[in-house]
Image: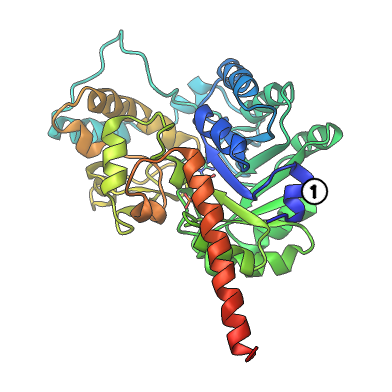
C-alpha cells in the first residue's frame, strides 16, 4: 500500500475521499486515508470555518481541498460576469417548466423568509475558485484538486510554491495529457460510473490508458470504487490509489437529510442517470421524478454552465426545503449526485469502518491472487 503517493502525502493508505462534509474528511484522514473537502458549495467565509474545524479535528493528519474551475463556462472569457447579468440570460421557459412540475407535485412555493439552501451561483468560476484557493492556502492543506478542466496557472503556481501538490479530474486521455502538460502532479481518471460530472468511458477502460499516457505521473482511479476488491483492480491497472465520492454519502458522519439517505440505501446500480439537468454538463445522479421530467419530450433544452444551475436553483431549494419536512410528494423529486456504486451502499457505516474494510479486502484479494499465481506456476 505504500505507493509513491502515500510517501509524498504522508498517508498510510492511498484511499482518497471527496466529500462536502467536514466530518467525513476528518474521519477518513484520521483513519489513514486522505480526505478532500469540496469547496464548491461554500462561500469563502464558510470555507474558512470548515477548514478551521478540520484543523482542530484531524489530529494533524493530511487533507486536501477541491475547487471547481471549469475550462468553459459563460462569462469566463470576459473575466466572469455578475450574477445579475447571468440571471438575465436564463429564459422564462425553464422557470415555467419547473413551476409546472413542482405544482403538479403540489410542492408549495418558498416564502420570502425562507433562506436558500444553495446560492444560485455556486463556486464554479475562476474568481470563486481563486477565492477558495486563497482561503485554503491559509491552512495546512497537502493537495488542491480541480474539476472540469486543468487548474489555471494562478492555482498551480501558488500551490507549488507552498509545497502543495496539485491534482485534477479527467474523463479522457486527451484531458489527462493536457493536465500533465499544465503541471498537474496527480491525475484522477474518472470513469463514467462516477457520481457527479462524468464522461462516457468506464474506469476499467480509462485507467490503463491514462496511466500509460501520463507515466510517470501518478494516477488515481475514480468512479465505481466502493470496496477493497475494486481498489485492488485499480492498482492492478497501474493506478497508485483510488479517489472515491459516492461511498461516503451514507456514512454515519454524512449530513444529508434522511429522505436522501433512505433513497441512497434503497437504490440499485440501475437507479442513476447521466443528465445535464443539474449543471448543464453531464452529471451522474439519482433517478427521480425530477430528473425523469427533464428526459421527457416537452422538457426545455438545458443551458450551459453556470446558467443551468442558476435556472434550477429556486426549484431545488423548494424541493429540498419541503422534503426535509416530510412533505408527501416533494421527496419524490429530491435527489443527489451519486454513482453506480450506490447499489453497493446498503447500510450506514462510520467512515473509519469503510477505510478499514477497503484495506482488509484489498489485502485479502492480493493474498488470494498470490496463491493463485503460485498454483499457476506449479509451485
Ligand atoms: C454528491 C457528489 C458531489 C460531487 N461534487 C464534486 C465537486 O464539487 N467537485 C469534484 O471535483 N468532484 C465532485 N464529485 C465527484 C467526486 O469527486 C468523485 O470523482 C466521484 O464521486 C468518484 O466516483 P464515485 O462516486 O463512483 O466514487 C461529486 C460526487 C458526488 C457523489
Which residue is nearer to you in this view: 70 or 211? 211
Q: Picture quarter containing residue 52?
A: top right
Q: Is residue 152 in view?
A: yes
Picture residue at 63% right of the left edge, 19% below the top: 56
**Percent x, y for residue 193?**
45, 58
The N terminus: image quadrant: bottom right
Picture residue at 30% right of the left edge, 9% below the top: 112
User: Of helix, strand and loop, which one carries label 1?
Assistant: loop
Does 127 sit above or below residue 285?
above
Picture residue at 63% right of the left edge, 42% below the top: 32
Does 264 sit above or below residue 235?
above
Q: Is residue 231 in view?
A: no
Of all residues, the one furthest to the top in this rendering is 113
Of all residues, the one furthest to the right in this rendering is 161
**Percent x, y for residue 167?**
69, 45
Of all residues, the one furthest to the bottom in this rendering is 378
Q: Picture quarter containing residue 67?
A: top right
**Percent x, y for residue 252?**
40, 34
Q: Would you say 138 lies left or right of 76 here?
A: right
The C terminus: image quadrant: bottom right
Q: Would you say 294 lies left or right of 332 here?
A: right
Colouring method of the image: rainbow
Q: Would you say 21 lies left or right of 66 here?
A: left
Which residue is nearer to you in this view: 148 or 373? 373
Does 220 sit above or below residue 259?
below
Does 249 sit above or below residue 213?
above
**Percent x, y for residue 261?**
31, 37
Q: Residues within 10 Å of mark 1 (few under 14, many from 20)?
A: some
The residue under label 1 is 183
Which residue is nearer to you in this view: 83 or 24? 24
Amino acid at each position: 500500500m505504500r505507493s509513491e503517493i502515500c510517501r509524498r502525502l504522508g498517508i498510510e493508505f492511498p484511499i482518497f475521499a471527496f466529500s462536502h462534509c467536514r466530518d467525513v474528511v476528518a474521519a477518513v484522514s484520521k483513519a489513514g486515508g486522505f480526505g478532500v473537502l469540496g469547496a464548491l458549495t461554500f462561500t469563502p467565509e464558510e470555507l474558512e470555518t470548515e477548514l478551521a474545524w478540520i484543523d482542530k479535528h484531524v489530529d494533524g493528519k493530511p487533507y486536501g481541498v477541491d475547487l471547481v474551475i471549469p475550462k468553459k463556462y459563460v462569462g469566463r472569457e470576459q473575466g466572469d460576469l455578475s450574477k445579475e447579468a447571468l440571471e438575465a440570460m436564463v429564459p422564462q421557459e425553464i422557470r415555467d417548466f419547473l413551476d409546472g412540475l413542482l405544482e403538479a407535485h403540489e410542492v408549495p412555493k418558498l416564502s420570502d423568509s425562507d433562506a436558500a439552501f444553495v446560492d444560485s451561483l455556486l463556486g464554479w468560476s475562476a474568481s470563486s475558485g481563486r477565492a477558495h484557493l486563497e482561503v485554503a492556502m491559509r491552512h495546512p492543506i497537502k493537495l488542491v484538486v480541480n474539476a472540469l478542466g486543468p487548474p489555471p496557472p494562478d492555482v498551480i503556481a501558488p500551490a507549488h510554491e507552498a509545497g502543495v501538490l496539485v491534482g485534477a479530474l479527467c474523463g479522457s486521455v486527451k484531458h489527462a495529457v493536457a493536465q500533465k502538460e499544465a503541471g498537474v502532479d496527480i491525475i484522477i481518471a474518472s470513469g463514467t460510473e462516477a457520481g457527479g460530472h462524468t464522461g462516457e468511458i468506464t474506469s476499467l477502460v480509462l485507467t490503463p490508458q491514462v496511466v500509460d499516457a501520463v507515466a510517470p505521473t501518478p494516477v488515481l482511479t475514480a468512479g465505481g470504487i466502493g470496496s477493497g476488491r475494486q481498489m485492488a483492480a485499480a492498482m492492478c491497472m497501474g493506478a497508485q490509489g483510488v479517489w472515491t465520492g459516492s461511498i461516503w454519502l451514507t456514512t454515519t458522519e454524512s449530513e444529508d437529510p434522511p429522505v436522501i439517505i433512505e433513497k441512497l440505501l434503497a437504490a440499485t446500480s440501475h437507479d442513476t442517470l447521466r443528465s445535464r439537468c443539474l449543471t448543464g454538463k453531464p452529471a451522474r445522479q439519482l433517478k427521480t421524478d425530477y430528473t425523469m421530467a427533464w428526459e421527457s419530450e416537452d422538457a426545455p433544452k438545458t443551458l450551459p454552465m453556470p446558467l443551468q444551475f442558476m435556472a434550477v436553483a429556486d426549484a431545488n431549494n423548494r424541493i429540498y426545503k419541503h422534503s426535509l419536512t416530510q412533505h408527501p410528494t416533494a421527496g419524490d423529486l429530491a435527489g443527489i449526485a451519486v454513482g453506480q456504486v450506490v447499489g453497493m451502499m446498503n447500510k450506514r457505516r462510520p467512515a473509519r469502518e469503510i477505510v478499514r474494510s477497503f484495506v482488509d479486502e484489498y489485502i485479502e484479494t492480493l493474498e488470494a491472487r498470490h496463491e493463485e499465481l503460485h498454483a499457476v506456476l506449479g509451485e
